[in-house]
Image: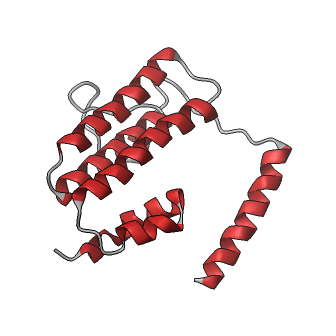
Amino acid sequence: MPIERFYSLKSVFEAIWGVNTYLHLKHCSDIKKWKEYATKTLKVSLIAIHKTVKIKDDDWQKEIEEIINDGLNNIKSCTSFDCLFSCISSTYIRLSFCQIGFLPVPTIYRRFTLRHSEWKLDMIRSVQYVQSNGQKQYQEKYNRLRIERMKRL
């Protein structure tokens, strides 16, 4: 199995966990090691959500925890890379929609198309991103560092 086909996921793990991740996963075909990184990443996502999202309702918090816990349970049962990457992908897609507003389930809501009018997902809750002056300054610094890093690659 060519492990190179998993480069994009390895790259994300490396961005989150540091350069040693590259060394652990570079030519690693041991699913246990990949499951370890997937599990750590889901767990830290929940920690980051708890620490970062300041205003939230109880139902949203429960749903986020449910999505991540489902993902963690699914990862445990994976015996193949395809299963593992499917679990990670589906967990983060569900998480993304939950953070936008809600995951539209056609059997509950209605059938969706690609019409823009059908994708305003604020029927249950709305999302607002705000940025303080200190956060703006940090973002400028972060963007400069990111551009410098990209130039070195």
* Residue 9 quadrant: bottom left
Judging depth in this view, the residue of 98 and 75 nearest the camera is 75
Quadrant where the N terminus sits is bottom left
Judging depth in this view, the residue of 11 and 117 nearest the camera is 11
User: Eyeballing the image, is 143 above or below 98?
Assistant: below
The answer, for residue 114, to whether it is visible in the render is no
* Image location of residue 56, percent across then percent down: 57, 22
Judging depth in this view, the residue of 74 and 98 nearest the camera is 74
Give the left or right position of residue 37, taking residue 78 as reference. Answer: right
Q: How is the image coloured?
A: secondary structure
Quadrant where the C terminus sits is bottom right
* Residue 63 quadrant: top left
Question: Which residue: 52% across, 57% down?
Answer: 16
* Image location of residue 112, percent across then percent down: 29, 40
* Image location of residue 22, percent across then percent down: 44, 70
How many discs appear?
0
User: Eyeballing the image, is 24 above or below 27?
Assistant: above
Q: Residue furthest bottom?
A: 152
